[in-house]
Image (tube, helix red, strand yellow):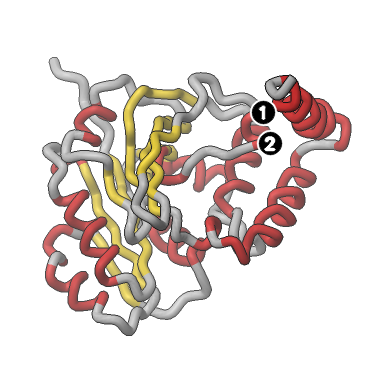
Amino acid sequence: MAEKKPKISIVTINYNDRVGLEKTILSVRNQICFEQIEYIIIDAASKDGSLSVIQKYSDLFSFWLSEPDLGIYYGQNKGILNSKGEYILFLNSGDTLASENTLTEILSFELSSDLIYGDMLIESKEGNLRLGRQPPVMTLSHLLLDTIWHPACLIKRKLFERYGLYDLNFRIVADYEFWLKVFSAGVSTKYIPVIFSRFNLQGLSSAPQNQNVLLQERKKAQSLYFNRITLFLYRDLLKVIRFLFSLGRFF
């Protein structure tokens, strides 16, 4: 008897990015195993014609809405609340799945862990691509110095039922705060060698003008779950070691 594959809810949020939205929708529609996907679109009352794109492809969606909201995580929380899949993948407007075989590749692995993550292609504003790899084992040090990439991670939906939705007090890093919360609670993680998505670096968290807020919010989130000694050992000390190692390459 063939193993039953989990249903995956893909949530796309959009605001005034009609071109990017259609590109994202087409990358999902073209998946060979589209029958395993529940597709959800959350639009923040766009004024650029995005609604006509949504209506054009409405037969693909399990749920969609277009109404005003207060930002990315408001939209993603709406998507979570209206999803029914075992896992959720967030693929924001303008980002795409890496190929038409992406979900087929993902589903070829045994999927039972709470967080299942892989790699992704990172596209610069100039259109240049580089392959971003995530670590084969997720560690506290990695989380404190980096993050888990949202468009390259399946999140078990029950985690949101158990630990709550994204905290809207974090404007830019609510997903990062969620990673810290669930990791500190001991959820299971699994790396699979699959390129999940193609991520566009023009989002809110990538904008230069938001970097100070991003760093402040990261530190605030870290202080919620880890004491100063832990942060020193797994974050600050490693920063110093990395810096000294980089200096050594010049001598």
Residue at the spot 32% in from the left edge and 20% down from the top edge: 110
Q: Residue furthest right?
A: 229
The one of 183 and 97 positioned closer to us in this rendering: 97
On the image, the x and y values in percent for residue 229 come to: 87, 31
The answer for how far apart the CA atoms under marks 2 and 1 are is 6 Å
The residue under label 2 is 144
Q: Residue furthest top?
A: 1
Note whether 78 is above or below 37 in the view shown: below
Horizontal relation, residue 216 to residue 16: left or right: right
Residue at the spot 39% in from the left edge and 38% down from the top edge: 130
On the image, the x and y values in percent for residue 11 come to: 34, 54
Please, what is the three-letter code of the amino acid marked with disc 2? Leu
Residue 125, quarter of picture: bottom left
On the image, the x and y values in percent for residue 247 come to: 75, 26
Q: Quadrant of the C terminus?
A: top right
Residue 20, quarter of picture: bottom left
On the image, the x and y values in percent for residue 138 come to: 56, 25
The residue under label 1 is 140
- Look at the numbered discs 2 and 1 and tell me whether their residues touch, using CB distance below 8 Å: yes
The one of 77 and 120 positioned closer to us in this rendering: 120
